[in-house]
């Protein structure tokens, strides 16, 4: 038997204090298997020990929330007895080490989280952050991650309908791969993870267990160093075909009433699934590890418990239903094994070859999971940069073209054309718009789905950045005509043991809290990924927000594309011309400075509610919010999407470059038929919303009076070319 | 009219095909599981897209050896119309029902987008609803759609009018840019010699309503259902 | 008895993966590479049988499933 030395404890990522707690709970020295279990259960990834204190401050309730954070995914009511179930999760470290498999298994994991709860996945999204475009690894990572997401999602037959991608040097050594899945379930047939019923069988289904990913969960909670390349063998390999079978088999079994509880085996595999089920149910579990289906010979209890082999589930069945369930899984050619039972001891007892391999109390282990109040410092508020303080460009047209072809704004078509975004036949707003829109099959309803975060804002001013991320998600759903309902968050940060990083985390959460509250947009699920640092350099704080909204009648959906000649272009919201952290500043002046644009949540809500109301009245022919790149980029995107120009006149005291490129929040551009202008104006007046009529659609140029005239085809060319060119460089395969 | 849709483990466009057929037929097709050894009485057999058996080994290779495919091949030989879409096309070539093979896309990547297709041969049953030489729009979504046949076979397909669709520009030009996968002669779909089996990479079932972005697929199914009766 | 099957694309069939590998090798400075064709190996673990019948069986497997003879060649190696 392995002796538990200080070194072994340290290798398992437990601090001395944490190990003392282990000794106290057990009243003896743990064996290696037990130590391994403590190590994964108390890792940052599973215990949220640095973040819990702050996550608790987020609003998680609303009348339409059926299940908030704490289960495999969050659940909202979307009417007619239907529920949407969704979550976003990170797979950052594995994707950096092995981009294809890391991203693929990230997608597989998040889909399992959703179908574990009884939902059929109907849409996938992803939020990706890569290093600067000219970093030697970037092309290879983009190529591998995108292929991995495509490889898994396409095979599953779940459409990948959108997402976002940023490039920034802060991610050179730590890319972010955040995958989101939205599923559809019957509101009265949702499955939870709390084990119950003493004597009920505990059943293992899915793929066999191998030595994959042992210590993946602890790896996901450690900083990288130069030896990280050596960690490659711990990365898991995904098998989307098996997961497709697992999905169909689980949904088939869920249509019966045989399941008491179900939990997928994700990070920390059998350990975290069995402990969570036992802890939530307040029961004990006994497992005979000899009965676990194994792919390799000679696996030890330690390896079985810590393996992160993919495509596996743990279930508690009602007594006597085993054979019925077995038949379903055998039909789908999946392993099915009764490996244990629920007990009333409150202990997790694992046996193998007739010996007790581990015997741990469930509740104390879960309750005693460390929780830290890490020291933090507040980020100093940066100075506002006014438009007048930024030099005007020689040529506004050239500036717009530069932005349209820049890394943050250029078309992501090269990415999303690799994703099957139409399978299931319900994608009615494809990637490239403000939010993706997917019909609820067989109804007039649809879900609008978006992911958003502007990390440079979060870095400069975490509170504003956190609020902005939530507000932008809300706005993107609104621009399609959807009613925003809830969010999932994926909190990607550096090392929380550094007070300035912890301060960014605290700030972002506070901003999110304010925005979620003001916009009635609660958090229903999420995930935290810390220690995204290499050699002491952390990523930009990146609280990625996945938002979901509901359209009651998809016939009223709006897209950003300009539709027909003569439609009148309207701007709502006030342009301030503040240019701190704008892409204009970054791309044209080469500096990332100043305060991000202000987020006024009251106006945000008022303007959004107005636009949504206008859309639902059927008055709006196109709508788009202002975000990265400002009004100029918003107009160009609408023109490109509609393949038609516009004649715009701006009456503003601001310098033209500030009016066009400041990233003012809470603003939308939309179009109406000429005969509806007065109605739009009237409703805005009644609500005291600033409304400006800025032009009409027509011709083949985007013409902004006194500023620029550029053909739409030129804009489109510049916008489309950047990413394919980046990806055709040598070494990008 | 009665239709049967074959379902393999890993098929994932079976439901979409069912929706499209139901919309045009006014009744649902029968879904037939791969392990079944008998086909129901049917006027049309449809093999859907997806990743049968994960597309492991080669796309369509394992599905081609499933019990139900022996029956499908027999029925096809007896003249029953067979519509094989995407992975179904790959399965059909693997069984030998259709000539040639579908290789990895020339650009190595999965590609999902709308494509324009020139109707290059007459076949009343499948494309009689379109004008000869018309360009129609269906989406593609595949990793292995790069049609290959040796030169003799290719010449034969051209000469015998067995090429159903070619990737084209919206005005019907057969350019390299219009070809999403490197297929020889821009081939997107072919018939067997008898003309009762159609295999194509694009998915007509994905553009069957205005909301989805087009209705050429609906026209395709409406005519197919009409012509079979 | 173990058997190893090598499957490769026939000459004349475009091999985009081989081309991509070749391109990357050149990028890494391996200029001596003139051409790359890629394929796959399939290892079979067979019940005990004599070599002759093993070879015949594996031949059948290749014909029926392991290779697509429209585009692929195969060769069989019996290992002890």
Image (cartoon, coloured by chain):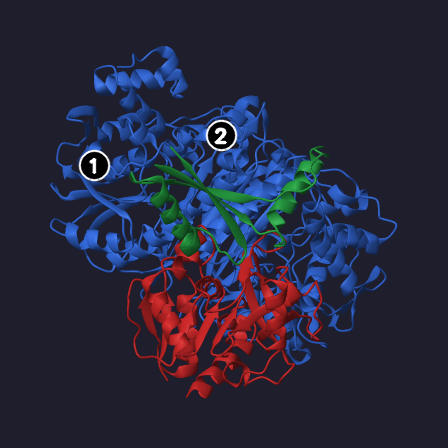
Chain colours: A blue, B red, C green
Give percent across and percent down for residue A88.
Answer: 45, 46
Alpha-carbon neighbours of circle 2 within 10 Å: few (<14), some, or many (≥20)?
few
Give percent across and percent down for residue A194.
Answer: 23, 43
Instruction: Answer above or below: position of A441 versus A98.
Output: below
Q: Looking at the rendering, which quadrant does residue A302 occupy? A: top left
Q: Quadrant of the C terminus of chain A?
A: top right
Q: Residue pushed farthest right?
A: A394
Q: Nearest the camera: C36 or A140?
A: C36
Q: Residue pushed farthest front?
A: C52
Q: Nearest the camera: A255 or A469?
A: A255
Residue A509 visible (yes or no)? no
Residue in the picture at 70% in, 73% down: A568
Horizontal relation, residue B181 to residue A297: left or right: right
**Could you tell me which secondary element the residue under label 2 belongs to?**
helix
Residue in the picture at 34% in, 33% down: A307
Q: Nearest the camera: B122 or A97?
A: B122
Whether labels 1 and 2 belong to a single chain: the reply is yes
Give percent across and percent down for residue C14.
Answer: 63, 53
Instruction: Answer above or below: position of B170 versus A245.
Output: below
Q: Which mark is residue A232?
A: 2
Give percent across and percent down for residue B188.
Answer: 58, 68
**Could you tell me which secondary element the residue under label 1 belongs to?**
helix
Q: Looking at the rendering, which quadrant does residue A6 occupy? A: top left
Horizontal relation, residue A573 to residue A609: left or right: right
Closer to the chain start, of discs 1 and 2, is 2
Instruction: Answer above or below: position of A684 versus A584.
Output: below
Q: Which residue is mark 1?
A: A291
Chain designation of label 2: A
């Amino acid at each position: 038997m392995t002796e538990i030395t200080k070194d072994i404890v340290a290798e398992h990522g437990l601090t001395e204090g944490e190990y003392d707690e282990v000794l106290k709970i057990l009243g003896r020295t743990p064996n290696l298997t037990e130590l391994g279990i403590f190590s994964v259960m108390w890792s940052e990834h599973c215990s949220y020990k640095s973040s819990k204190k702050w996550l608790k401050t987020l609003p998680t309730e609303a009348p339409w929330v059926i299940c908030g954070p704490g289960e495999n995914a969050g659940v909202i009511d979307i009417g007619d007895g239907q529920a949407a179930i969704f979550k976003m999760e990170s797979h950052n470290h594995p994707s950096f080490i092995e981009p294809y498999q890391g991203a693929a298994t990230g997608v597989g994991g998040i889909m399992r989280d959703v179908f574990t709860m009884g939902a059929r996945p109907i849409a996938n999204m992803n939020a990706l952050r890569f290093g600067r475009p000219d970093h030697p690894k970037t092309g290879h990572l983009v190529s591998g991650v995108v292929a991995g997401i495509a490889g898994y999602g396409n095979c599953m037959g779940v459409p990948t309908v959108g997402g976002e991608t940023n490039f920034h040097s802060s991610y050179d050594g730590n890319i972010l791969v955040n995958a989101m899945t939205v599923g559809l379930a019957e509101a009265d047939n949702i499955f939870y993870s709390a084990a119950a019923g003493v004597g009920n069988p505990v059943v293992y289904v899915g793929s066999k267990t191998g030595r994959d990913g042992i210590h993946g969960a602890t790896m996901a909670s450690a900083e990288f160093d130069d030896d990280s390349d050596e960690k490659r063998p711990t990365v898991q390999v995904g098998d989307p075909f098996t997961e497709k079978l697992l999905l169909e088999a689980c949904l088939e079994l869920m249509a019966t009433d045989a399941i008491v509880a179900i939990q997928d085996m994700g990070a920390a595999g059998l350990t975290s699934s069995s402990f969570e089920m036992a802890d939530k149910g307040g029961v004990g579990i006994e497992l005979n590890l000899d009965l676990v289906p194994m792919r390799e010979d000679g696996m030890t209890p330690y390896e079985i418990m810590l393996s992160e082999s993919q495509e596996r589930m743990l279930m508690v069945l009602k007594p006597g239903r085993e054979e019925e369930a077995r038949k379903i899984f055998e039909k789908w050619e999946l392993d099915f094994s009764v490996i244990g039972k629920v007990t009333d001891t409150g202990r997790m007892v694992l046996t193998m070859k007739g010996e007790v391999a581990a015997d741990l109390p469930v509740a104390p282990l879960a309750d005693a999971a460390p929780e830290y109040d890490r020291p933090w410092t507040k980020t100093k508020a940066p100075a506002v940069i006014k438009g007048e303080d930024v030099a005007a460009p020689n040529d506004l047209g050239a500036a717009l073209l530069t932005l349209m072809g820049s890394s943050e704004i250029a078309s992501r078509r090269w990415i999303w054309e690799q994703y099957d975004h139409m399978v299931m036949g319900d994608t009615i707003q494809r990637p490239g718009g403000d939010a993706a829109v997917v019909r609820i099959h067989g109804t007039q309803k649809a879900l609008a789905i978006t992911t958003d975060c502007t990390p440079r804002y979060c870095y400069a001013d975490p509170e504003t950045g956190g609020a902005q991320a939530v507000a932008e998600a809300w706005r993107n759903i609104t621009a399609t005509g959807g009613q925003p309902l809830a969010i999932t968050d994926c909190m990607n940060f550096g090392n929380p043991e550094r007070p300035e990083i912890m301060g960014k985390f605290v700030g972002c959460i506070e901003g999110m809290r304010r925005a979620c509250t003001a916009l009635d947009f609660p958090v229903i699920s999420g995930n935290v990924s810390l220690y995204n640092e290499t050699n002491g350099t952390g990523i930009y704080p990146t609280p990625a927000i996945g938002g979901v909204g509901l359209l009651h009648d998809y016939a009223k959906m709006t897209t950003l594309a300009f539709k027909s000649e003569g439609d009148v272009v309207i701007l709502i919201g006030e342009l301030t011309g503040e240019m701190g952290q704008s892409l204009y500043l970054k791309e044209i002046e080469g500096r990332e400075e100043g305060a991000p644009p202000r987020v006024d949540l009251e106006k945000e809500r008022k303007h959004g509610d107005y636009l949504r109301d206008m859309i639902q009245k059927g008055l709006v022919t196109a709508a788009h919010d202002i975000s990265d790149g400002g009004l100029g980029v918003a107009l160009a995107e609408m023109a490109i999407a509609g393949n038609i120009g516009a004649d715009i006149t701006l009456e503003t005291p601001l310098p033209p470059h500030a009016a066009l490129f400041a990233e003012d929040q809470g603003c939308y551009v939309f179009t109406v038929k000429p005969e509806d202008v007065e109605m739009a104006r009237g409703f805005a007046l009644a609500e005291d919303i600033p409304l400006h009529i800025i032009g009409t659609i027509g011709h083949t140029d985007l013409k902004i009076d006194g500023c620029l005239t550029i053909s739409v085809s030129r804009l489109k060319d510049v916008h489309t070319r950047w990413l394919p060119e980046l990806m055709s460089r040598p070494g990008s395969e | 009219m009665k239709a049967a849709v074959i379902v393999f483990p890993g098929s994932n466009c079976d439901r979409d095909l069912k929706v499209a057929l139901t919309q045009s037929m006014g009744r649902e097709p029968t879904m037939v599981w791969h392990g079944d050894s008998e086909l129901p009485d049917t006027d049309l057999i449809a093999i859907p897209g997806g990743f049968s058996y994960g597309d492991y080994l080669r796309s369509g290779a394992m599905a081609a050896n499933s019990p139900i495919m022996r029956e499908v091949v027999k029925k096809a030989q007896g003249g029953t119309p067979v519509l094989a879409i995407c992975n179904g096309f790959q399965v059909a070539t693997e069984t030998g029902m259709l000539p040639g093979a579908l290789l990895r896309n020339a650009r190595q990547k999965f590609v999902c987008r709308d494509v324009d297709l020139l109707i290059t041969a007459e076949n009343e049953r499948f494309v009689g609803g379109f004008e000869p030489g018309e360009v129609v729009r269906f989406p593609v979504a595949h990793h292995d759609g790069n049609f290959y046949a040796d030169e003799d076979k290719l010449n034969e397909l051209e000469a015998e009018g067995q090429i159903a669709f070619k990737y084209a520009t919206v005005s019907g030009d057969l350019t390299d840019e219009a070809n999403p996968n490197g297929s020889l002669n821009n081939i997107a779909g072919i018939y067997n010699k008898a003309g009762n089996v159609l295999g194509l990479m694009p998915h007509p079932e994905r553009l069957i309503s205005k909301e989805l972005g087009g209705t050429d697929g609906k026209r395709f199914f409406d005519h197919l259902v009409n012509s079979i009766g | 008895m173990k058997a190893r099957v090598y499957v490769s694309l026939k000459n004349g069939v475009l091999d985009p993966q081989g081309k991509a590998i070749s391109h990357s090798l050149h990028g890494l400075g391996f200029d001596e590479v003139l051409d790359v064709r890629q394929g796959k190996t399939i290892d079979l673990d067979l019940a005990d049988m004599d070599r002759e019948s093993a070879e015949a069986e594996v031949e059948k497997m290749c014909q029926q499933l392991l290779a697509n003879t429209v585009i692929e060649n195969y060769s069989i190696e019996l290992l002890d």
